[in-house]
Image (cartoon, rainbow, N blue to C red):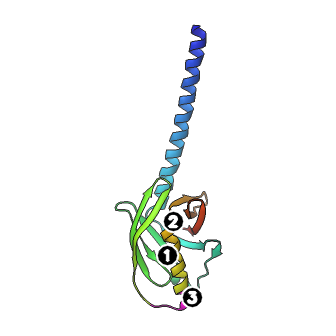
């Protein structure tokens, strides 16, 4: 009986240790993802599955997220923008977005409008091993950025 109880105890201890390692790996992965997310200038590559084409470097759409306080800012093809962001683990949302109100060619204005529409729908993010940031609504990728 002692032998069976000892094996059972060893089994439970092993399962607990393995699950703790798994939780540690997940927490470490989340922390690394958050560290890369903050204080970098992300450059928009895709809106949905459409590649963004820029005539020059100055019109790139950018995204900068700060941690404390959690804010967002950047350039949106035509205007500068700023607002609040909430980041918790792999969840993210953008609130109270505002921008300057400069007029630009219609093509830039259309791109900017699509960008803001997508940003308002975002509720999750991932960063892959290549350093690409995916802003998603649930599992649907809305925006893709690189550093």
| Sequence order check, earlier mark of 3 and 2 | 3
Residue 92 in percent (x, y) is at 47, 60
Q: Quadrant of the N terminus?
A: top right
Check disc 1 and report its element: helix, strand or loop: helix
Residue 89 in percent (x, y) is at 47, 52
Can you identify the residue that label 3 sits on?
107
Local packing at callout 1 (Cα closer than 10 Å; few below 14, some 14-19, many 20+) is some
Q: Quadrant of residue 99?
A: bottom left
From mark 3 to mark 2, how far is it between C-alphas?
Answer: 23 Å
Mark number displayed over residue 116: 1
* 106 left or right of 84 in image: right
Taking depth in this image into account, of 29 and 56 the one nearest to the observer is 29
Check disc 2 and report its element: helix, strand or loop: loop
What residue is at 44 percent from the left and 75 percent from the top? 74
Q: Are marks 3 and 1 in contact (CB under 8 Å)?
A: no
What residue is at 42 percent from the left and 80 percent from the top? 80
| Sequence order check, earlier mark of 2 and 1 | 1
Q: Quadrant of residue 129?
A: bottom right
Q: Are marks 3 and 2 in contact (CB under 8 Å)?
A: no
From mark 2 to mark 1, how far is it between C-alphas?
Answer: 10 Å
* 147 left or right of 87 in image: right
* 74 left or right of 141 in image: left
Q: Are marks 2 and 1 in contact (CB under 8 Å)?
A: no
Local packing at callout 3 (Cα closer than 10 Å; few below 14, some 14-19, many 20+) is few
Local packing at callout 2 (Cα closer than 10 Å; few below 14, some 14-19, many 20+) is many
Residue 86 in percent (x, y) is at 41, 61
Q: Quadrant of the C terminus?
A: bottom right
Can you identify the residue that label 2 sits on?
122
Check disc 3 and report its element: helix, strand or loop: helix
Q: Which residues are magenta?
A: 103-108
Residue 6 in percent (x, y) is at 57, 14
């Amino acid at each position: 009986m002692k032998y069976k109880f000892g094996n059972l105890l060893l089994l439970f201890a092993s399962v607990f240790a393995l699950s703790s390692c798994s939780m540690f790996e997940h927490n470490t992965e989340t922390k690394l993802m958050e560290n890369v997310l903050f204080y970098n200038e992300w450059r928009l590559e895709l809106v949905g599955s459409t590649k963004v084409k820029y005539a020059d470097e100055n019109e790139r759409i950018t995204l900068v997220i700060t941690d404390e306080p959690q804010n967002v800012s950047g350039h949106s093809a035509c205007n500068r923008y700023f607002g609040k962001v909430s980041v918790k683990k792999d969840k993210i949302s953008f609130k109270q977005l505002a921008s300057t109100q400069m007029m630009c060619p219609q093509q830039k204005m259309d791109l900017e409008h699509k960008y803001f529409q997508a940003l308002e729908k975002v509720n999750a993010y991932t960063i892959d091993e290549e350093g690409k940031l995916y802003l998603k609504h649930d599992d649907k990728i809305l925006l893709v950025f690189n550093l």
